[in-house]
Structures are given as C-alpha cells and as structure tokens.
Image: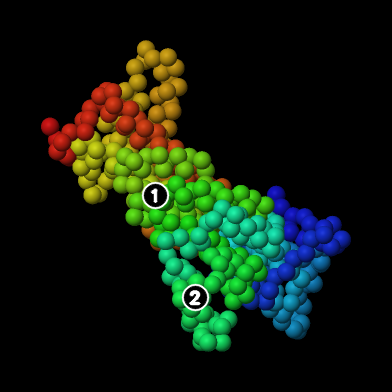
C-alpha cells in the first residue's frame, strides 16, 4: 500500500501554520535535474479487460498519481486539444514538491542511490528535510544561535584553544580565503594582515576572538560552515592526542544534543582517529561498529576505511556503495584470517570460495559439529546458513553493488535491504575473526599461524 504523501500526512499542521516548508528555487531546479536523470519509460495496461498498453514514464505517472491523491480528475485527451503543459515544479507550493519526490520514488521503486543524492542536495542547500525509506522527515531545528553560543561558552570556560597546535592563520586558512576577507584594521588590506598584527605582533586580541568576528559569522553562518570549523578542531592535524580529542568530541555532542547533528569516529589517519559530523538517525547497525574491535589484529587503516565507507553509505542512503562495501569487508577479513593461518588465497577466488576456505580451516562447517553435542542439529543449521549469507551478499553485490555495470531495468532495493546486507556482512566478519582468535589461543584448529604461508591444498 502506497503511503500518503507529505502534504496529506501533515495537512493539519500545514493549515494551522505550526509547520512551514520552504524549498528555494535553486533546490527545486537541482531536484528536477536529479528526477529527470532518473526518469525512465515503461508500458502500462490501465484496463485489465483491454490489451491496450500505454507508453508512459515515471514523471508522467507521478503527476497522474498525485492528481488521484489530490482528488483531481484527469481530463481525457481529445483530438485537437492543445498539448499538455510540461511539468514545472518551480512555482508549486513547497509541500507539493515534497509530495512529488515521494511519489516519484514510490512509482519508480526507488532507483538505487537516488534517495541519497536527493538528501545530499537538500543538505548542501541547508534545507532541513531528509528522505528516509522514501518519505520526508524534518531534521527539526538547524543549529540555533543559542546552541552556537552554548558551544562557544563551553570552549571558553574549559580553556579550549580552538586552533590547537596550529596558529590562527594556519587553522582559518584551511576553511576561508583570508586574503579576500576584509581587514578590521585600516592599516591592513585583508583579514590575514590584521590577524597577523593583532594576534602575533601586538597580541591584543583574546584567544576566543574568532567566535564573535562578523567576517566569519560563526554565530549566524550556515550549518556546513560551522560544522567544518568544529570538525577541524577535532582533526589529528590540530589535536594529535586521542584522549583530548575524544573529550572535546563528547563535550561538543553534549552541546549539540538538541540538534540534528553529532560527531562520530570515522576511520583513522596516521594511526589517529578521525572525527566527522553526521546527521542523527543515520547510524550504522551496531554490528558494524563492532568490526572496529578487530582492527588491532588486521590492517587497521584498511579496515577502518572500509567501516567508515560502509557507515557513510548507510548515512547517505547509498544502496550500491553499502552493498559493494559489505562484500569487500567480508573479503578483507577472510583474506586476513587465511594469511594469518599460512594460507595464500588464489587471485581468482571469489567471496564464496574465500569464506568456504575460512570455514574449513576454522572447522566451523556443519560437518565439523559432532552429533553428540547438545543442540547439534541447530548448530549445524546455523553454520550451514553462513554459506547462504555469503552467497546472498555476493549475488546482491553483482546485481546492485558498486564495481559492476548494471542493467538499467534493475531496480527496487531500498535502504532497509542495504542495512540488512551491511549488518549480515558485519556479523559474519566478526564471527569468523573471533572464531579465528579463539582457535589460535586454544590451538584447537589446524594451521595455527605457521611461519611460512602456503597455498590451500599444499601438503
């Protein structure tokens, strides 16, 4: 059953003024461009008793469906009538634009990646609405002036130097073109000049001068600018000590608790954690974060990069990338296990072969379970399902994931499917590696970390 569109779900709030929506013209144009690129034609038999098939496309059917939902009867076309005007969302009420996007996604069965692209576009234009499973949700408030002042007060009271181990110019030049910003001092020609004068030569500006400087307007700038400023404060280049950075991230998240944003660990750089901002509600399944625990036993930077990419794909509703990365995660963990056990995987081994070799060397295939064990039948069934999970991930990646060309008619996977694949892949990776560690510590499995790798099947 198709969900009701945005304007009907929020009809009362829109009519009494408690909810308002603004969609600027530039955003409407970008949205129309994305929908036009994703549009495709198809045939539809409208009367089951008539074999006639209409040639149509998603945009036309979206407009037709909205007419039905709004209770507007479509006038039949008569010979000699003027052509039907082209769809033009530039002048529509903003709530109708959101309706159109939702119905388009429903009609097209959610082309992979489109929801993520739309969310990214809304984010870039600072419009506080995001799609989740094909329907728009409010991001609540943007970061208010009061919240921003709370952040700056927290930094001042705790003596946090926003520039860290850099100086003011080194820090700010990573975010702003200081040479093009005006000087607040008539003796200098630009912002870089007066910062150099008052922070280095005269030293007569306080450490926290930047929070209230109108040129940078951190109290009133758009959210992406503020978030990039705070994100840079957490960067390993600015703060190399992990403990200090983690405490600062926790304090910032406390100040931002009433907003739609938070900071989270997103991989490593030079063996130090990297912190990024993200929208709340886009968190990865808990099993994905659990994969990070394995990083001390494998190539940490590579594994962290995979986890970070998978998390971002889920946050940004990128179905293709999430499925492709999930497969790569299982491959990477499987190869690490085999290498640590002295087995050199062949280049032509696919995912199924890799996991099968791992299951065999770890003795977690069903045939390794003794019938005398309690619940042996159930354990065998669960272990047998590992093979089906592996095959399913590989098949979905080949059909939908990154790394392979796809038929334009392949459609239909949504973010709930991507989260299922990501969670299953992460759970499988954790199970296999924890079993590997357990077998290694107890010496109960074969090929326990020999010194010289050998190929599978070597005697």
Q: CA distance from mark 2 to mark 1?
A: 44 Å
Q: Is residue 342 left or right of residue 4?
A: left
* Rendering coords of residue 397 (x, y %): 42, 51
Q: Quadrant of the C terminus?
A: top left
Q: Which mark is residue 304?
A: 1
Q: Name which residue lies at 23% across and 27% down.
A: 446
SS of the residue at dot 1? helix
Q: Is residue 85 above or below residue 54?
A: below
Q: Which mark is residue 428?
A: none
Q: Name which residue lies at 46% across and 60% down.
A: 164
Q: Residue furthest right?
A: 16
Q: Is residue 33 above or below residue 382?
A: below
* Residue tagged 2: 202
Q: Is residue 299 left or right of residue 108?
A: left
Q: Is residue 255 above or below residue 292?
A: below
* Rendering coords of residue 375 (x, y %): 44, 17
* Rendering coords of residue 160 (x, y %): 52, 56
């Amino acid at each position: 059953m198709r969900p009701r569109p945005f304007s009907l779900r929020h009809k009362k709030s829109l009519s009494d003024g408690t909810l308002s929506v603004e969609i600027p013209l530039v955003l409407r144009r970008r949205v129309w461009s994305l929908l036009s690129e994703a549009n495709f034609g198809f045939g539809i038999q409208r009367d089951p008793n008539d074999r006639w098939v209409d040639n149509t496309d998603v945009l036309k059917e979206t407009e037709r469906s909205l007419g039905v939902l709004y209770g507007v009867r479509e006038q039949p076309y008569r010979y000699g009538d003027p052509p039907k005007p082209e769809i033009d969302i530039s002048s529509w009420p903003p709530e109708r634009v959101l309706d159109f996007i939702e119905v388009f996604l429903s009609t097209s069965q959610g082309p992979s990646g489109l929801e993520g692209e739309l969310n990214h576009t809304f984010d870039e234009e600072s419009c506080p609405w995001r799609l989740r499973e094909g329907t728009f949700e409010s991001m609540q408030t943007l970061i208010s002036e009061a919240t921003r002042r709370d952040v700056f007060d927290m930094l001042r009271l705790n003596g946090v130097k926003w520039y860290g181990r850099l100086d003011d110019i080194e820090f700010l030049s990573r975010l702003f073109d200081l040479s093009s910003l005006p000087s607040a001092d008539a003796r200098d020609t630009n912002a870089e000049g007066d910062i150099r004068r008052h922070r280095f030569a005269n030293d007569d500006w306080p450490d926290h001068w930047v929070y209230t400087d109108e040129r940078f307007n951190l109290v009133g700038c758009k959210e992406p600018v503020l978030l990039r400023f705070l994100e840079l404060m957490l960067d390993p280049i600015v703060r190399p000590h992990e403990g200090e950075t983690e405490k600062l991230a926790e304090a910032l998240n406390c100040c931002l608790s009433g907003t739609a944003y938070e900071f989270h660990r997103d991989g490593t750089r030079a063996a130090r954690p990297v912190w990024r901002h993200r929208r709340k509600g886009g968190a990865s399944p808990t099993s994905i974060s659990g994969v990070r625990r394995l990083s001390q036993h494998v190539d940490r930077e590579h594994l962290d990069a995979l986890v970070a990419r998978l998390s971002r794909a889920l946050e940004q509703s990128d179905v293709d990338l999430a499925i492709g990365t999930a497969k790569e995660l299982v491959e990477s963990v499987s190869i690490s296990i085999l290498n640590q056990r002295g087995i050199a995987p062949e280049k032509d081994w696919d995912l199924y072969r890799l996991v099968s070799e791992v299951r065999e060397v770890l003795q977690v295939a069903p045939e390794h379970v003794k019938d005398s064990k309690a619940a042996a039948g159930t354990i065998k069934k669960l272990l047998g399902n590992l093979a089906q999970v592996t095959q399913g991930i590989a098949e979905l990646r080949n059909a939908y994931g990154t790394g392979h060309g796809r038929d334009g008619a392949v459609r239909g996977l949504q973010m709930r499917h991507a989260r299922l694949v990501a969670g299953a892949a992460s759970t499988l990776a954790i199970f296999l590696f924890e079993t590997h560690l357990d077998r290694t510590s107890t010496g109960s499995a074969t090929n326990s970390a020999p010194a010289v790798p050998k190929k599978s099947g070597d005697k």
